[in-house]
Image (spheres, grey):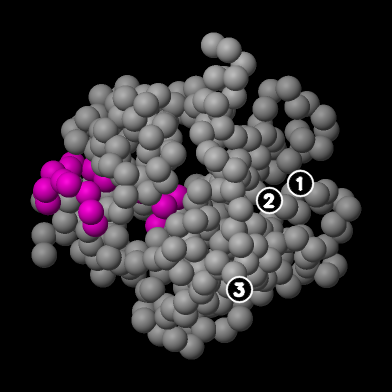
């Protein structure tokens, strides 16, 4: 492969710019309880082309962006190539998603094998927000028959071209599949991006077979006691000691927002439980964990501070998985309820 085509394979996106005049916003009420009396939570959490966006918190416990970018503005944000470097994990990862293909496919093959064990079988799997198709490829290797739906045209195109996957490009509502088609639906770090999470969950429920399962993974750090305590302690935090990397991961840099508002919803265990039940699911299991930043766990990094941080992350993960500590990420295994 020439260096030019290698570069093209790594950078599937054209150059990107949003004009501040094209940033349009809309007011929304709480997606979980319908209430419209939120309190300020974290002002200026995000920005698009210099336009700031603020997180608010509903008395029901839900945290969300209000006002938020309107549909076309949100759509434009996903055409930013930076979404696939720092954007897609809001600062936790810094490496290009597409460059991590081999590593992620291997990792997801294990995830899908564990899922098959958990469900007691394989079958037809649908992934909502399948991005470059790495989980779908892992699930295919684990024995599932796989299809995906993805809004981002370059990502959907990549999954079809590079991996030969069956990916529908567009909104879930417009996908061509018949109701009752799938044994399992998978939504990993997707629901927090959706403008109508209840409608999305109901549509997924309809696409499932009567005894079908849904896996939902969401980040929950921003709507956790961790983040609230750190916000309160922000003024006295030993920023120098924590270091820039950690301050960025913890979203505590007062001089820098966390980039584009990709996460318009911030669930916790209670609010997501309420929403999935309203959508017609019963909860089979809920597990907490913390995302382990990949760059921190690179073998090449062996300095004392990195090793210390790895230890901290592993301890936190242990505590969260055993429900001793509030979770930074939640995984719900759900079953379609009959009525
Ligand atoms: Zn609410």
Foreground label between 3 and 1 = 3
Q: Is mark 1 within 8 Å of ligand 1?
A: no
Q: Nearer the viewer, residue 315 or 278?
A: 278
Residue 40: which quarter of the image? bottom right
Q: Nearer the viewer, residue 242 or 180?
A: 180
Sooner in the amino-acid sequence: mark 3 or mark 2: 3
Q: Are marks 1 and 2 in contact (CB under 8 Å)?
A: yes
- Does 2 sit left or right of 147 as displayed? right
Name the residue rendered at 23%, 54% in the picture: 174
Instruction: Check disc 1 and report its element: helix, strand or loop.
Output: helix
Marks 1 and 2, how far apart at CA: 6 Å
Name the residue rendered at 37%, 74% in the picture: 32
Classed neighbour count for the residue bearing mark 2: other residues with Cα under 10 Å, few (<14), some (14–19), many (≥20): some
* Disc 1 target residue: 245
* Disc 2 target residue: 249
Marks 3 and 2, how far apart at CA: 18 Å
- Residue 278 placed where, x, y %? 26, 70
Classed neighbour count for the residue bearing mark 1: other residues with Cα under 10 Å, few (<14), some (14–19), many (≥20): few
Residue 252 shows in the view: yes
* Disc 3 target residue: 54
Name the residue rendered at 47%, 80% in the picture: 27
Marks 3 and 1, how far apart at CA: 23 Å
Which residues are the magenta region?
Answer: 173-191
| 101 in magenta | no
Q: Are marks 3 and 1 in contact (CB under 8 Å)?
A: no
């Amino acid at each position: 492969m020439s260096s030019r085509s290698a570069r093209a394979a790594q950078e599937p996106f054209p150059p990107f710019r949003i004009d501040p005049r094209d940033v349009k916003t809309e007011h929304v009420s709480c997606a979980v309880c319908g209430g419209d009396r939120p309190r300020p939570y974290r002002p200026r959490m995000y920005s698009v082309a210099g336009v700031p966006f603020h997180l608010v918190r509903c008395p029901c416990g839900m945290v969300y962006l209000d006002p938020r970018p309107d549909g076309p503005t949100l759509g434009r944000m996903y055409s930013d190539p930076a979404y696939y470097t720092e954007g897609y994990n809001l600062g936790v990862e810094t490496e290009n998603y597409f460059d991590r293909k081999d590593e992620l496919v291997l990792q997801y093959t294990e995830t899908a094998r564990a899922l098959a064990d958990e469900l007691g079988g394989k079958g037809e799997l649908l992934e909502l927000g399948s991005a470059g198709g790495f989980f779908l490829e892992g699930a295919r290797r684990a024995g599932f028959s796989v299809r995906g739906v993805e809004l981002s045209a370059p990502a959907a195109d990549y999954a079809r071209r590079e991996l030969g996957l069956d990916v529908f490009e567009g909104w879930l509502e417009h996908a061509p599949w018949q109701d009752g088609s799938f044994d399992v639906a998978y939504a990993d770090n997707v629901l927090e991006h959706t403008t109508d999470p209840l409608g999305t969950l109901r549509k997924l429920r309809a696409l499932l077979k009567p005894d079908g399962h849904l896996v939902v993974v969401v980040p929950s750090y921003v709507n956790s006691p961790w983040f609230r305590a750190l916000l309160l302690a922000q003024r006295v935090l030993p920023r120098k000691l924590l270091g820039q990397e950690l301050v960025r991961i913890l979203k505590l840099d007062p001089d820098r927002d966390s980039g584009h508002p990709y996460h318009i919803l911030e669930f916790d265990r209670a609010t997501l439980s309420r929403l999935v039940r309203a959508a017609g699911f019963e909860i089979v299991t809920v597990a907490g964990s913390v995302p382990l930043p990949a760059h921190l766990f690179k073998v090449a990094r062996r300095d004392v501070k990195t090793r210390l941080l790895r230890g901290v992350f592993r301890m936190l993960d242990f505590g969260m998985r055993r429900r001793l500590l509030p979770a930074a990420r939640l995984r719900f295994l759900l079953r379609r309820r009959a009525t």
